[in-house]
Amino acid sequence: MHPFVKILLFISILALLGIISAQALSIMLVILLGMIVLFKHKKFWQILLRMRWLFISLLIIYAFGTPGELLPYFPVQFAPSYEGLSSGIIQLERLLIALAALSLLLTASPRQEMMLGLYLLLLPLKYFGLNVERFAARLMLTLHYVEALAESTQHKLNFDALDRAHNDVTEPIMNTVHIQQRSFRLLDKIVIALIIGLMLILVYWNMR
């Protein structure tokens, strides 16, 4: 599949997160997690392990900060609400879906393909004065730097680590970026048409 189509699919998934129902969110999450297991993407589970306190904090904030019917028989004087737990779980599902979709995108697309996809996605902004080639190159270099930092086991989540990050990244960052054009196949055109059609249907449905 063309890298532009892969990025378009990722953007479409992010756009759907705020539109589809809770049941559809759960189905999408199961499908994406199944694909993660199928492709044996170990980095995704490492990311989840590192973000566990964020997930727990997010759930606690929604559970105890959202007014509604309180859970009975709670051992302390204050209790989470049903509405808060429901909202917290939905937000966690959205975050997990976004992370899973991003992990699959990065796994299925080498850096050069991502470069091409980003270039084609940003190409219309060229008419507004944006240097697309330079912007895409800088964005890819940033992704390269963040990826190297995330894979490093020597860093902890603090400000001192951010100051030392540049000196600890051992892999040299590429100075020259080449964009290799690829033609769209019939499958790519069909997927693009389906994405556009689905988005138009959802926009029309929500405007009713």
Image (cartoon, rainbow, N blue to C red):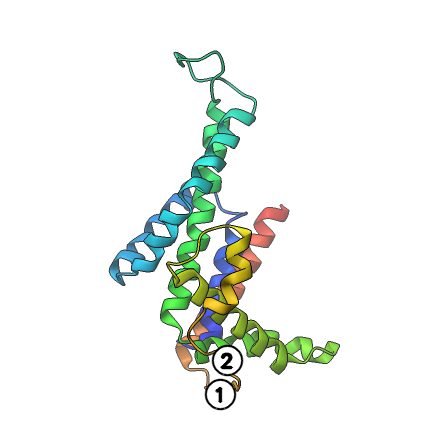
Q: Secondary structure at mark 2?
A: helix
The spot of residue 130 in percent (x, y) is: 70, 77
Residue positioned most to the right: 129
Residue at (25%, 60%) from the top-left corner?
A: 38
Residue 116: assigned label: 2
Task: Residue 76: tell me if it is visible.
Answer: yes
Taking depth in this image into account, of 25 and 202 the one nearest to the observer is 25
- Percent across and percent down for residue 54 are 46, 42
Kindly report the distance in space between the C-alpha atoms of the residues bearing marks 2 and 1: 7 Å
Q: Is 97 situated left or right of 138 in this image?
A: left
**Is 146 located above or below residue 186 in the figure?**
above
The amino acid sitting under disc 2 is Leu
Decide which of 116, 165 is in the foreground and name it.
Answer: 165
Residue 40: percent from left, percent from top: 26, 61
Task: Specify the quadrant that holds the C terminus.
Answer: top right
Query: Could you tell me which secondary element the residue under label 1 belongs to?
Result: loop
194 in relation to 66, above or below? below
Q: Which amino acid is tagged 1?
A: Gln
Residue at x 42% of width, y 49% of height: 96
Q: Which residue is mark 1?
A: 181
Relative to 87, residue 113 above or below: below
